[in-house]
Structures are given as structure tokens and as C-alpha cells.
Image: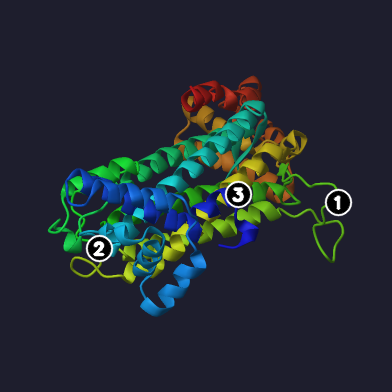
Amino acid sequence: MIPRYSRSLMTDIWSPASKFRIWFEIEAHACDALADLGVIPEQAAKTIWEKGNAVEFDVERIDEIERETRHDVIAFLTHLAEIVGPDARFVHQGMTSSDVLDTCFNVQLVKATYILLDDMDKLLAALKKRAMEHKDTITIGRSHGIHAEPTTFGVKLAQAYAEFERCRQRLVQAREEIATCAISGAVGTFANIDPAVEEHVAKAMGLTAEPVSTQVIPRDRHAMYFATLGVIGSSIERLATEIRHLQRTEVLEAEEYFAPGQKGSSAMPHKRNPVLTENLTGLARIVRMAAVPAMENVALWHERDISHSSVERMIGPDTTVTLDFALNRLTGVIEKLLVYPENMDKNLNKFRGLVHSQRVLLALTQAGCSREDSYRLVQRNAMKVWEEDKDFLTELLEDKEVMEVLSEAEIREKFDLGYHTKHVDTIFQRVFG
């Protein structure tokens, strides 16, 4: 987590001050529930809230205590006792460290997810706007990087919109998956704390009670969460890679916005490089990187160990902060993307009609030719375009075998670009409603 790829809105969630405030709220809400049950005095619970809310927790003091105790939760509780006074003895009654740590971690992930969902909404809005703008902008579709058949640039963006809409739905599900609370004590049996305390804390923190916590919240939830973020990272890279390819000099159908005063190369003043989408490709790798260790965290020993702890201290903030930054960067790229329809038209016609080969093939089969013969006739003429720089339509019209099956009018009709875009409205209706 470095400032270059961070936004404060997200990093604030992971700051020590934010973490300790959440820890306090968990402990204080638990005290409220314990007071309701008659386990601790009501006045003690009130005092804990009043004194805890009246100060900012001293991060340096907590770190100082931890250097001696070698235990972060005990260091916090010791500092809290310095603030609260004698009533601090009622804090953490029947609880274990994981109750605080795991519940806090899930609170942070839920908060982070709300930011990510807002990021997704902004990206979806940008994609929809540009898709509508270029709904009928004809371009060449490619398979294996080679010209295939015509499509529209709007359809390309509509595909990205649909993909990120699926990502958003998964993210909502991941948020629900991760929004659980555990206040169940050692090995998760509630032996020293009533389950009602967990229910109270869960409700107060916007979570649900974990059915079986075994002292720690099961890490399959977290594996699902970070895998979801990894898929979003892959979708970011897919769109970024498309833009990078389209910006290549010999293609130049779309291009990242190049600001006045921007420089592309320290050596070559002419350069306009796709640096933002290259950056997004790299950031996507960092986001995906969290998925495997999150899955490896699932297999903890017995009721608990802490092999997951060091992993989550890193992947929690790093992954959410990076993805937040990446989504915002991608939105900016889409909003300012330069699109060149004239280059799309030029590239589409670069190989003089070859993109209509399938229509000619189908016409021959429908006119009575076997598929094998039809393919042979079309490919024979197509290869002349590739190898001899011929014109596909001209070659077909001069091919006696083809002309024995199809008339000139029938052949020319197969070169109508409008044929390939006749269902764009249907696609857009499916995607955007």
C-alpha cells in the first residue's frame, strides 16, 4: 500500500486509528450487552463509552505497550484501561482476541466494499455513456488478433459493461459473505460469554452472527471475498488490454487521453504511450495475488492458529486500496478515451473485403454447393488477397466456379456492412434494458 496507488478514502479504513476505534466499539457494545444481562454494572458500560469516546487513542502509546507485551489486543486493552480507569476491568469479559480481531477485520472489509461498489457504479456509468455514443460506430472484430467480422465499438463497450455488472453482483454477494461477527470466546463455545452478546454486537456493527466461529471466523468466507476481488482485477485487465491493443500505432482505433504537457518518453519526444492501461494491467496482478494466500488461509489448525494473521494484515489493505485506485483510474480512462472511427473504417477495409468471407461461404452452401467445396472456393480467393494484395470482391466475380453458383448481385449483396449490425439493438436491449 503506497501513496502512488492509494486514495485516502480507502486508506483511512485501514489506518491504526480507525482500527483501534473499531476495536473499542466492539468492546463497548459487548459491555452494553453484558450490562443488559446483569454480568457487569450498567454504569460501568456507560463509563466505558463516555471515556472511550472522549479521546483519540494514542497509537504510539499502544505500540510502546505492544513492544513489551508482544500482543496487540492486550496492548490496546492496557491503553484503554489507562483512559477508562477501574471500570476497565469489565472490558473483554469472556472474550478472546480473535473476537475483536476477526470482527474488526470484517467491519473493515464491509466498509471497503461499499467504496468499491461506488467505484463500480461510476465505471458502469462511464461505460454505458460511451457505449451509447458509439453504438453504431462500425469497427472490425478480431479473433486471435486477426480480422474476423465487423462489429461496433459500442458493442465492445457493452460487453465490458455486462462483465462489470456481473462483477458488481459478485461483489454484493461477497460483502454479504464477509459481514459476520464472532464474539464466542475461547474455541468458540460461548462458555464464558452469552451468545446474546454476539447477537447484540453483530446488530450494532451492521453484521450477522457467525453460526460456528471455532474461535476464529471461518476463512472460506475471506477466500471467497478475495477471489471475487481477483476476478474484478481480471476484468479490469481485460478491458485495459483491449485499449492497449487498440492504441498500437499500426491500429490506433482508440487512445488514452494525452494531456497538454504530458511526456511519453525521456528519449523519444514523439511517444504517446498507453501508460494508464499498462499500469492497470500491473495493478490487476497485485489484486489477483491475494486470492491464493486467502485460500491457503482456510486450512487453519484445529479451532484456530494465527498463520492467517500476517497474510490478512497485508492483503486486506493492499488489495482493497489497489482495487479502489484501479477502478477509479479505469473510469477516468473510459471517460476521456479518444476514439477514431476513421481509423476503424480504414483498418476494416485494409484487406479489401475479406471480412465478408463467411457470408459468401454460407451463400454458396445455401445455393447448393457442399460445405467443403464452398470453403475451398472462398478460401482460394481469400488467399489471393492475403498473398497478392488482390481485391476479394473482384476475385470472386472473376472466379468462374463461384459465378456458376451465385449471380453478381448476390455476391455484391454479401458485402453490405449493415448486415453485421442488424442485431445491435437487441444486444443493447439485453445489456442495458
44 left or right of 186 in image: right
- CA–CA distance between discs 2 and 1? 57 Å
Q: In the rendering, at what x and y percent does residue 109 appear?
A: 41, 50
Residue 102, compared with residue 386, is above or below; it is below
- At mark 2, the secondary structure is loop
Residue positioned 52% across, 60% down in the render:
285
Residue positioned 40% across, 46% down in the render:
110
399 left or right of 84 in image: right
Which part of the image, by quadrant, shows the N terminus?
bottom right
- Mark 3 — residue? 240
Label 3 amino acid? Ala
Between discs 3 and 2, the one toward the N terminus? 2
Label 1 amino acid? Gly
Q: In the rendering, at what x and y percent does residue 301 appear?
A: 22, 70
Q: In the rendering, at what x and y percent does residue 183 appear?
A: 24, 54
- Which is more foreground, mark 2 or mark 1? 2
Residue in front for this viewpoint, 246 or 199: 199
Q: Residues within 10 Å of mark 3 (few under 14, many from 20)?
A: many
- Mark 2 — residue? 96
- CA–CA distance between discs 3 and 1? 23 Å
Residue 131, compared with residue 22, is above or below; it is above
Residue 261 image label = 1
